Each structure stands twice: as structure tokens, then as C-alpha cells.
Amino acid sequence: MIDDVPLTTREWQLAARPHGEPKPEDFRLVEVEHPDPVEGQVVVRMLAMSVDPYMRGRMNAGKSYAAAWEVDETMQGGAIGRVVESHSADVPVGALVSTNAGWRDVAVLDARTVQVLPELPGIPPSYHLGVLGMPGLTAWAGLFRLAEFKAGDVVFVSGAAGAVGSIVGQLARLHGAAAVIGSAGTPEKVRWLTEELGFTAAFDYHDGPVAKLLAQAAPDGIDVYFDNVGGEHLEAAIGAFNEFGRGALCGAISSYNATEPAPGPRNMGLMVGRKLSLRGFIVSDHADMRAEFIEKVTPLVTSGELVVRETVREGLDQAVPAFLDLLRGGNTGKMIVKLADDA
Amino acid sequence: MIDDVPLTTREWQLAARPHGEPKPEDFRLVEVEHPDPVEGQVVVRMLAMSVDPYMRGRMNAGKSYAAAWEVDETMQGGAIGRVVESHSADVPVGALVSTNAGWRDVAVLDARTVQVLPELPGIPPSYHLGVLGMPGLTAWAGLFRLAEFKAGDVVFVSGAAGAVGSIVGQLARLHGAAAVIGSAGTPEKVRWLTEELGFTAAFDYHDGPVAKLLAQAAPDGIDVYFDNVGGEHLEAAIGAFNEFGRGALCGAISSYNATEPAPGPRNMGLMVGRKLSLRGFIVSDHADMRAEFIEKVTPLVTSGELVVRETVREGLDQAVPAFLDLLRGGNTGKMIVKLADDA
């Protein structure tokens, strides 16, 4: 089972901090010789890596909520790999592992920085980067803890065709939402939401003011809003909230490339009279929900009740194009970069 | 103890719905004959009535969070009175009662719509409109439930010299806040906050951008924000929040007379990365906290640990001037209109 481990690995480095939309020249693919593993370390050959919207924040100087990537250093991010050489009793050769050492083909890692994953029938390794990984737990924690979702709620999800949004909407439906409304950026995504994921209604936010589109899709108002987009979407959701409406603020992809502050919601005054709550969150603060999440969601995935879709790019050289495309909404479901055939 | 009950009462009616800042002509003081009380009713002579910022919303058509006042009808609001004639076994003559029948001298009311108040030594009846009434419970619920205040938090209160804000800041100090910062609209109010109420720091929001003034007053950031003002204050608070900062949104007096939507906070993106929460609320949803609030706050008032100040206007004819002055910040502490000498 021990692969022939190459002595070199290709790695993506941050070449420059972007102003506004990142460009391919802001990144650099290099070939480096990796160090010999020492006691307590493992060598991991990556099967799949994640590109995520939050990574745009890591390109900037200063802490956003994940540490900034350093210029001229190798970037980090979620990746699933297989251990091909082990100097640790805890992590055997052949183990499937979750790591934070994405953006490279091979990594030499301290064994305690990797998590050994179960081999689950019907669950491809890449799902640990999506529905059973960080985006899935984000959906779970945001919906059930931050937004305090309960059966009978009308739920609105922005970025609903994305890795997180597509799970949020389905979890809400499977747990008794009165209606699930999603917004997305193309007619194909909108059709996918209603025809395959069981959303009650969906709209393309390019088709008009979001507030108007939302009012049409949710004529009786909304109780829960899961925000992946921010900006105009957030203002529309505040305006559509019924009394005691709850918003879980997960991201604001509409502003990630902004160079000027976007206008804020002009209807914050509704927060008081309608007794609304808005709560921002980062999934890493909710790791205590992980065991319950895995226990509940895994069977939904294997049974097919929860539909999973990935947008897959092949090969490490496609990682940056995949990331740039993600920021432009080029994915449906989770964007994955496959680094090996058995991902 | 039965007074000589007049057959007529003076009452304030809404004459017109204002556009922007209300004018004296939007109100009308009329003398009306009140009906004879029937079985189950009491006649209440009012001692003091409340004018509150939220009443501005009741002047507009449509529900804000209290029902709109109707044009050409008598307005309502909190008032404390004494029963001068009773046709109910539950509410005897002489009882001190809390009613929603403000804006008049005398009211004939169903006994079940009034609450009999205890006669507390050292507690003037008007305090039941302020520190021991709706504003006090608003401060209590907002601080402890909505903002989840805990000892060690740095607390910022806007409108800190008002009926609610002055109690919020003192409650936070008395319960172990690391620092309490207040904003107000005059140098006198600012001095009152720091010199008499024990605020750590305070500023006059006219003295510069609120974000800058707040950063100077709270160099280590804030954990809790109690918002009575909205607008620029809310944006400044969001910008000053430490991780897991919590905002209780109680009111937005900066916008009550606005005829156009004010700009929203341009920094809502911070909500995610700093894991912030903002929660709007109305005190009536938190009546379950009332018993605990009265039990805990009454001794603080009688001992003088909690400083209470009222801005008092005399006579029903002064009710509208008092209300208009309140909306311009003419009060320090609770604005009260005394309607009888024993208020």
C-alpha cells in the first residue's frame, strides 16, 4: 500500500495580495522538495482539495477570521488525502485523513494535525470536504443553532446552489420547513433548486430587485434567513422577516472583492419592531455539534434523501482557476479539485 | 377617600399624522364628558403620565409595534392613577393603579385593564412609569436576556442619559461590567453620566464621528451594545465590537422623524468574522422577567445605589410640549408629566 513517494511536490503560493478581484498572477505554482519525514510525522498524498469563498479573506493582509496567507508562502486549506508513509503509531499507512494542507500534491505533516476519517460505503472521500465536512457542519450549525430553525418556519437561503446553501435548504425541507426559498445566480441553478433539491421556490437574483423577487417567492414572509451573500440580499431578507425572524449570517460573497464598503441595509429599524435577530458565526466555534451532525447527515446522504452535487476540476494546476471561478459563482454544489483518481 | 369626581375630563387627541417632526398642531386637547361607570368599572384620576419615544411610531398609520393612534381619537399611553370610584370588588377605591389610559386627567376603565400597584416607601408613584416600569424592565431584559450581559463585559449604551439608557448603564456597572461607556447629546448629560451615574466614560455625539469618539472611550473594544439611537451609533458599535459582541436593539430615535430611509451600517460584513449578534426586542415580550426585575431593582432604588432622575413637566396641557421636547432630547432620565400633586 506504500506508494512510491516523490521527493518533490507541487504547491500553490500566494504571489501577491489582490486589490479587488483576484487574478491568476496573484498565485504561483512551484515545485519544491519536501523534507524527510521524522518521528511523529506522516506523508500524505492528497486526493482532493477544497476551494471555498472564505479563502478570499485569507488573501488579504491581517486576520479576517482565518489567518491571512503570507505572500510567497504555500497556501493552506482543507484537503483529503491518503497516508503513504507513516512515522506515527496513531495514523497508519493507508489511512484516509482530513488535513489543512490543501493546495499541494503531497505534504509531510505532524500526525496530530490530521484527522483519520472512516471509510464509509457510498461516501466518496471528497464528500468530507463538502456535505460531511466544513460546509455541511456550517449548514447544520447555522440552521439549527444560530437561526434556531424549527418545523413550520419559512426559510430563505441566499447562495442556495452553493456548497453550504444547497445543504441548508434541503436540511430545512427534511426537518419540516413550511417553505424553502432559494436565490441563485443562473437559471440552471434555479431549476436545480426547485426540480432536484425540493425547494418550494427559487429565483435568479439578476431578474430584478431582490426584495421584489423575494416578496413574490415568499408572499407570507420568512422566518429564517441563511445569508451567504450579504448586501442587497440581507436588506431584502430583513424586509421580508415576520416577527421574531432569525438570520444566520454565514458569509457575504457579494462583498468579498469589494474595494469600497457596500451600502448597509437601510431597514435596520425593522429589527426592533419585528424583534429580529441577526447572528454571524464561524463554523469552527461549533465543533461541539460535529458528532451529532455526522450521525444525522451521513444516513441522509447514503440514502439519497439529501442530494449532493459537486463541481469537480481535475488536477492541482486547476486549483486557482477553480477558486477564481468559485468567486464568480461558477460552481453548483461544492467546488472540488480532484488531485488523484481515487478521490 | 372618594374624590369629587368631575363629570368631564380633558383628553389629548391626535389631530393629524405628522410628516417628519411632529408639530403642536398635530395634537388637540379636548374636554369631554366621560360615561357613567358601570359594574366592573373603576374611575381613575391620573397622577402622572408617560411620554416615550416609541409613541412617535404610534402617530403613523399602520402598526409599528404598538397599535397606531387613530386620528381624532384620544391617545393612549402609560399612566399611574388613583381609583376614586369603584364598581369592582378587585380594585378598591384609593388603590394606586397602572393603566394604559394616559393623555387624560380622568378615565373610566374596566377594572381588569388596570394593575394595582404596591405602595412602596421611598418610591414615588411616577417611578412606576420609569425605573420600576416599562423603561426599567426594558433595560433589564435588554441587558440580561437580549445582550446576554455578563460580568467583565465592556458595555456601550447610546441615549445613555435617557429613561432606559441611564438604567442600563447603572445595572451593568452594578453587575460587574469591566467598563460602561455612554453617549448623550449635551455636555451636561455627559457630566451626569460620569459624575453621578458612575459611567466609566461618556461622550457627546455632536463632538465628532461616533466611531472615533467610541474608539477613544473604549480603546479595547466593546462586548455589549445597548442601542437606543440607531444610525451612525449602530455602525460605530458594530465597528467597535470584540469577537462575540452582542447588541440589544431597543430603539432608533435618530430615525423616528426621518422621511427617507437612513443609510444602513456599512460594516455588516464584520458580523460574520467577529461572530456578532444583533437582536431587536420589545419589552412586552419579556413580561416573564418582571417579577425578578421588580424584586432585584426595587432595593437598588430605595437604597440609592441606582440613581433615578426624572424630568418633570406639570399639568396635562404640558403633555404635548413634553413629548415634542423628549423627541429632541430635552429630558435627562425619564420624562414625566405630573397630573396631580401627589404623583
Image: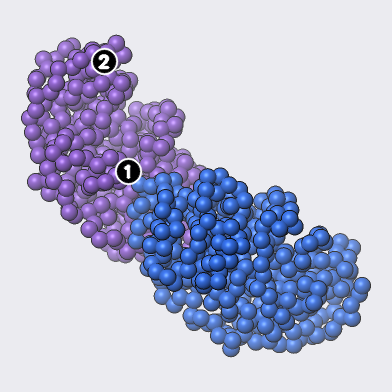
Chain colours: A purple, B blue
Image height check: is A98 above or below B123? above
For the residue pair A273 and A21, the one nearer the viewer reads as: A21
The residue lying at 35 percent from left, 57 percent from top is: B267
> Which x, y percent locates residue B195?
58, 62
> Which x, y percent locates residue B9?
78, 83
The residue lying at 43 percent from left, 43 percent from top is: A143
Residue A96 visible in the shown view = no
Q: Amino acid at mark 2?
A: Gly
Q: Which residue is mark 1?
A: A65
Q: Amino acid at mark 1?
A: Tyr
Most extreme residue toward the front is B195
> Which x, y percent locates residue A230?
33, 55
At mark 2, the secondary structure is loop
Residue B36 visible in the shown view = yes
Disc assigned to residue A40: 2
Image height check: is A164 above or below A236? above
At mark 1, the secondary structure is loop
> Which x, y percent locates residue A179?
44, 50
